[in-house]
Image: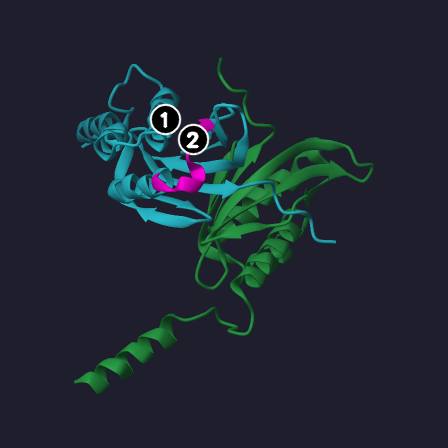
Chain colours: A cyan, B green
Amino acid sequence: MKKAFWIGAGLALLLTAAPLNAAEPIEDTVEASLENYILAWNEPEEAKRRELLTDHWTSAGTYTDPSGHAEGLEGLVTHIGGFLDNPQFKGFAIVRTSGIDIHHQSFRFTWEMRNASGQVLTAGIDYGEFDDQGLITKIVGFFGPYPELEK
Amino acid sequence: MKKAFWIGAGLALLLTAAPLNAAEPIEDTVEASLENYILAWNEPEEAKRRELLTDHWTSAGTYTDPSGHAEGLEGLVTHIGGFLDNPQFKGFAIVRTSGIDIHHQSFRFTWEMRNASGQVLTAGIDYGEFDDQGLITKIVGFFGPYPELEK
């Protein structure tokens, strides 16, 4: 009985332990996922965007910002396409402007939409979450500064 | 057949529409919920904290910050108790320092932990989510400034 318990406990530990690549801390996997996420925002070819997000963004992952909501990896591929096709944003790229602050299974970072001469159209922050494998399951973006405190 | 459809559609609309108090925009309900949430962080009596959070924080709502994770309304009542009992934070209060930025069912705001003479021990941001009734379902806090961008 006792022996069966320890074998069971050992097995449970084995099954719940560590991400796919046990040699790499999960933070590194999350940073790699977000690296590809930012590249996808600047990739005009739909097939390449899909490739950049695959293995880094869960198939059911959701993206939300003040301008819209995208369901799943395919939803995000399409949403970014809409952004890149918008003549208003021609010549502007999404650039991460802070390191990635991670705790538990959440993160935040800051970003800017800017062009080659450094003009910033929008600055914002992304909040997000990732799964046990370091794949992104959710990003919620916010634009501009925080609203002022009500008096 | 058509009539039954329209009655069905009308009923579905009625059942999914608007928060409890239909006269109040959901943003106002969320702001009231967060008002009580901040009051709870400064309430040393456990029963009063519970009262402040009831009807504003879902029973399964989760709270997470770099120092810990609390499950459910009861978990948060206990977590705040631990903070208020910590002699390190004696005399410090949690104060919201920005307006509440809301879109879809998410929000963010900034806060400080400060004492009566204005000394700030920690500043941070809260990201959160709310349900169809404007009750908080999740808050994830982050402490201090964003990490610097890696070179």
> Is A99 contained in the magenta span?
no
- What residue does disc 1 label? A30
Amino acid of disc 2: Gly
Q: Is mark 2 on a helix, strand or loop?
A: loop
- Is residue B9 toward the left or the right of residue A143 in the image? left
Query: Which quadrant holds residue A86?
Result: top left
Query: Residue B31, how many percent across, how many down?
Result: 59, 57
Q: Specify few, some or many for label 2: CA neighbours under 10 Å numbering under 14, 14-19, or 20 or more.
A: few
Residue A91 image label: 2
- Is residue B7 toward the left or the right of residue A102 in the image? left
Circle 1 marks a residue in which chain? Answer: A
The lab-note entry on whether marks 2 and 1 share a chain reads yes
Query: Residue B42, how many percent across, how many down?
Result: 68, 47
Residue A52 image label: none
Q: Nearer the viewer, residue B22 or A125?
A: A125
Q: Nearer the viewer, residue A28 or B8?
A: B8
Query: Residue B94, how many percent across, how many down?
Result: 68, 43
The region drawn magenta spans: A85-95
- Is residue A85 toward the left or the right of residue A67 in the image? left
> From what the image shows, is residue A24 above or below residue B97?
above
Q: Which residue is at 32% across, 28% downward?
A: A134
Amino acid of disc 1: Val
Q: Nearer the viewer, residue B132 or A150?
A: A150
